[in-house]
Amino acid sequence: MLRNFWGKILGKEDVQKPEQSGWEFNYAMDFVRQTLQYEQSKQDQIVILEYMLGIIKEDLKNDLLTTILYNKENFDKKISHPFPIYYEDEAGNKIWAKPDEEKMKKVDLANDCVLVLAWHRDRMRNIIKIIAKNSFEYIKGNHLAYYYTGADLCFAYNGTHSISAGIGHKKGFIEAKTIDIIPMFDHVYTDGDCWYNQHNGNKLRELYDFRVGVIYEISKIKYRLENEEDTAELG
């Protein structure tokens, strides 16, 4: 019963031993497995998963924010869409994870998790000073971002220096186009290194950070727990 439980909650491809490659991802998922195995209350399981999501998002967010401080000028690091932009269903039909052009999400720079990477030191120093003395001004044509429902994660790809400063000063908000990744949960999994087709194991693309994979998999499990009437039926 427990094996069936893991197979349906995590997906059989996700069950890996910590000794395999991607040990940080695997140890994090092992913590999740222990939570689901030893915590008998669904409410307690969800509380622990939410705690994990909160600190992992904060860790990733701050790691990206400090990249410009900890690296040489003109560093090579780049980020892109955190999740696959397309995937395939059981029949092999390609499904694009398209943004909802009509549904915008107001993102609070003080409290929401925004993944953003500033890259120019002169611009960064200048905007830090400006926003310290003034409020953050959201500019629709400059501050561009996607908000992923299902993971509650925002990826900002334009206006990165002012957004970074706004986050650091805990000021302001931006608006982001929404992309719902919940339909992706049944078709995509990750091992922390790459994204894979759930149905045939084909690789979609690599992750730029294992923590994105942890966030995805925990969000998937949390969603299934919250939407299953009785997890005992999974056995």
Image: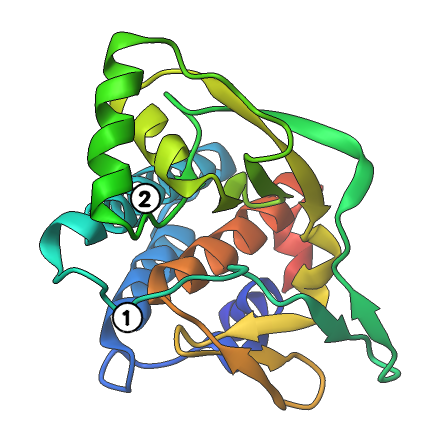
What residue appears at the point 12 percent right and 62 percent down from the top-left corner? 72
Rendered position, 135 above or below 155:
above
Q: Which mark is residue 56?
A: none
What residue appears at the point 39 percent right and 46 percent down from the top-left corner? 116
Question: Which of the 4 image quarters holds residue 90?
Answer: bottom right
How crowded is the residue under tag 2: few (<14 C-alpha within 10 Å), some, or many (20+)? many
How crowded is the residue under tag 1: few (<14 C-alpha within 10 Å), some, or many (20+)? few
Rendered position, 19 above or below 94:
below
Rendered position, 94 above or below 106:
below
Q: Residue furthest top?
A: 134
Q: Is residue 102 left or right of residue 99?
A: right
| Camera sees residue 228 | no
Which residue was labeled with disc 2?
61
Between residue 67 and residue 60, name the one nearer to us. Answer: 67
Rendered position, 68 above or below 78:
above
Q: Amino acid at mark 1?
A: Asp
Residue 152 at x, y = what percent? 54, 39
Between residue 232 and residue 208, name the one nearer to us. Answer: 208
What residue appears at the point 21 percent right and 21 percent down from the top-left corner? 129
Nearer mark to the viewer, of 1 and 2: 1
Q: Is residue 187 left or right of residue 226?
A: right
Q: Are marks 1 and 2 in contact (CB under 8 Å)?
A: no
Residue 110 at x, y = what percent? 37, 21
Q: Amino acid at mark 2?
A: Lys
Which residue was labeled with disc 1?
76
